[in-house]
Every structure is written in C-alpha cells, then in structure tokens.
Image (cartoon, helix red, strand yellow):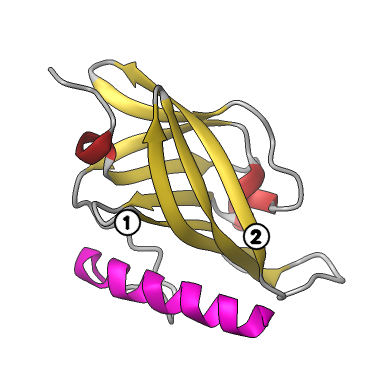
C-alpha cells in the first residue's frame, strides 16, 4: 500500500476527548484535509468551547504542516478574544494498524482544544463528522466553500 503524502493524506481525522464527568460530555477535535490543499480544524466541547482554524496544508516528508488563520468563537473562560490570529500546526504522519494517524508531538499554546498533543485518527477520505453546530458545514460537500468563506472573513476582520 502507498502511504505517501499528497492525495493519500486527504480526509477526515478525529480525536475524542472523554471527560470524567459524564454531564460535561465529550470534546472533539476534527481536522479535514481537503484535496484542494485547504484544511478546516475544529475544536468543540458543547457549552464550553468552539475554536476554528482554517487555511492551507502541505505534506513534507513525514509531516503535515497547517498554516492559516483561526479564532475562539466560544470559550468558557473569561476573558477570551474572538479576534482572528495566525494558526500554524505540525503533525507527524504515522501508520497504525494499516491506517494513517496524525500525531501532534508538541502542545500549541493559546489554542485550547486545538493545542492538544497526541493522535488524530483517520476516519476516511470523504467522511463527514457532524458536530451538530449551527453555522458550520452540514455535509462533506460544503466544507471547501465554507472554509474559503471562513478564511476570507477572518482575514478581513484582521485588517
């Protein structure tokens, strides 16, 4: 099997963070790597956080590099800023049990859920992971257009 980067790296990657208190629910990290070289990275914990970053990604050797813009849209800690800012993240590409996984080797300070270290597991090339959040894409086919609009909106509000 060919596990090189490029189109083979595209798809949906997810991490579920289980919290001890069941009433708080789980938190999710969802990363979409699109064939158009766009990415959409979402950190969501219902009632506590919604952080989104988007931009372009590239594969380089055994790494996936994300570079874009993002913002905390909901945060349970006060004060927090909704102001857009630069987003950069790097993942090591690994194969575990014949499936690709992306590993964040270091914490990315200041990005809350998006800063977590550890694994994001591959779900599939065109898999849509529905977080049931208003104003986010409702299908895999909506992700690219939504991501382009988000990046444009973030860049305009930074100016």
SS class, disc 2 = strand
Q: Is residue 113 magenta?
A: no
At a point 87% along the width and 71% down the height, the residue shown is 79
The chief SS type of the magenta part is helix
Return the x and y of residue 123 as percentages of the image width and height.
Answer: 27, 40
Return the x and y of residue 49 as percentages of the image width and height.
Answer: 64, 64
Q: Which of the pair 159/31 is nearer the observer?
A: 159
Q: Which of the pair 69/102 is nearer the observer?
A: 69
Which residue is tagged 2?
86
Q: Quadrant of residue 142?
A: bottom left
Q: Which of the pair 21/103 is nearer the observer?
A: 103
Return the x and y of residue 19 as percentages of the image width and height.
Answer: 62, 43
The residue positioned farthest toward the left in the image shown: 1
Query: Which comes before the other along the chain, label 1 or label 2?
Result: 2
Q: Which of the pair 73/45 is nearer the observer?
A: 73
Give neighbour class at mark 2: few <14, some 14-19, many 20+ (Cα, 10 Å): some
At a point 81% along the width and 70% down the height, the residue shown is 80
Closer to us: mark 1 or mark 2?
Answer: 2
Q: Give, as a single range, the part of the protein colored magenta.
A: 139-159
Q: Quadrant of residue 136?
A: bottom left
Which residue is tagged 1?
129
The residue positioned farthest toward the right in the image shown: 79
Q: Is residue 154 magenta?
A: yes
Task: Judge left or right: residue 121 versus residue 116.
Answer: left
Return the x and y of residue 52 as percentages of the image width and height.
Answer: 55, 63
Task: Judge left or right: residue 106 versus residue 13.
Answer: right
Q: Quadrant of the N terminus?
A: top left
State whether residue 36 is above or below residue 156.
above
At a point 20% along the width and 68% down the height, the residue shown is 141
At a point 23% along the width and 18% down the height, the residue shown is 98
């Amino acid at each position: 099997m060919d596990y090189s980067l490029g189109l083979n790296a595209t798809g949906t990657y997810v991490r579920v963070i289980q919290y001890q208190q069941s009433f708080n629910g789980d938190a999710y990290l969802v990363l979409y790597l699109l064939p158009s070289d766009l990415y959409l990275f979402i950190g969501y914990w219902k009632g506590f956080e919604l952080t989104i970053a988007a931009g372009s990604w590239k594969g380089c050797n055994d790494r996936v590099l994300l570079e874009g813009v993002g913002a905390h849209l909901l945060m349970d800690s006060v004060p927090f800023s909704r102001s857009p800012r630069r987003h950069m993240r790097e993942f090591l590409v690994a194969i575990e049990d014949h499936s690709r996984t992306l590993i964040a080797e270091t914490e990315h300070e200041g990005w809350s859920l998006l800063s977590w270290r550890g694994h994001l597991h591959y779900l599939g090339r065109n898999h849509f992971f529905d977080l049931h959040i208003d104003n986010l894409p409702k299908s895999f086919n909506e992700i690219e257009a939504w991501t382009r609009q988000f990046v444009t909106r973030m860049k305009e509000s930074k100016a």
